[in-house]
Image (tube, rainbow, N blue to C red):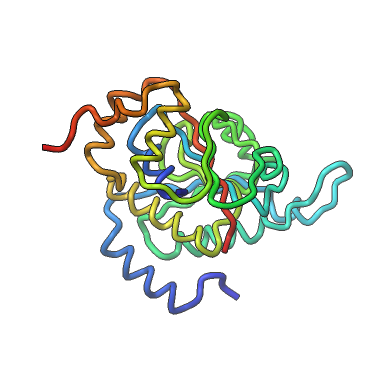
Amino acid sequence: MPIIGEADRDALRQQFEESLDRDVTIKLFSESEIRSMLTIPGRTANPMAKLAKDLAEELAELSPKIKLEMYDVHGDGVEAARAMGIDRTPAYVLGDDPEGRLRFYGTPVGNEFATIIATVEALSQNTPHLSSNLIAAMERLIEAPVHIQVFVTPT
Amino acid sequence: MARAAHAFAMANPHISATVVEVEEFPELAQRYRVMGVPKTVINETAEFTGAVPDELFMTAILQALGKQANESNEQPET
């Protein structure tokens, strides 16, 4: 049973055909499904691993311009996760930035699915949806690292 | 705020933006005392709860960096 309903899939496919310009990479850092079903002493199995993977795959199916890369943080993705400092799963890294500066920790269902879509579109258009004044002010004033965390719930 | 945070990070290479679904990471909700959403934390030093316009978001970023908030208004639109 798909997570994204059929009507929504059709609408999104059409929307992406118009809104997406260049390719956008989504990197999903997760645990392999088999591992996530095992109970390892001292570790909690992550029931969200499958949901996160299914959702990412369904999203990538909606446009050939969405390129999905999957990394198993206990397998072939160890190095990539370490390089980006990914310390939780599931983690979606949006775009090609080598430091993975645009992230979503957790599974973006409900309202937050719209966040992922908006960010994918902005990356594809290479246009952050901010006023040019604000972007200019940021260039002038921000010279040190800024880490923003936004805490959300799925509803 | 999630969208805006990603937009800020896209627009400036010094900024990184992580959106956290707190129900999956209750330990983070506890650590950052998330009582309402969206809650935004900047560099562990500035924070606000609720949605704010981009300009106020920028003000909070500057506060986190120890800068004067009104510096961002130096160049009004002409």
Viewer-proximal residue among A109 and A29: A109
User: Count the marks: how many?
Assistant: 0
Q: In percent of the image, x 50 and y 64: which residue is there?
A: A58
Q: Quadrant of residue B44?
A: top right
The residue positioned 45% from the left and 51% from the top of the image is B51
* B36 sits to left or right of B42: right
Q: Is residue B45 above or below residue A70?
A: above
Residue placed farthest to the left in the image?
Answer: B78
- Is B53 or B6 nearer to us in this picture? B53
Across and down, in percent, residue A154 comes to 58, 60
Residue shown at 38% from the left, 55% from the top: A118
Q: Is A59 or B63 nearer to us in this picture? A: B63
Quadrant location of the C terminus of chain A in the rendered image: bottom right
Residue B46 falls left or right of residue A141: right
Q: Is residue A128 left or right of residue A133?
A: right
Write the residue at 59% across / 31% down: A85
Q: Nearer the viewer, residue A60 or A105?
A: A105
For residue A98, which quarter of the picture? top left
Place of residue A28 in the rendered image (x, y in percent of width and height, measured from the top left) = 55, 48
- Which residue is at the far right? A41
- Quadrant for the N terminus of chain A in the image: bottom right
Residue A95 % position (x, y): 41, 43
Picture layout, residue B27 above or below residue A99: below
> For the view shown, which residue lies furthest in the bottom direction?
A7
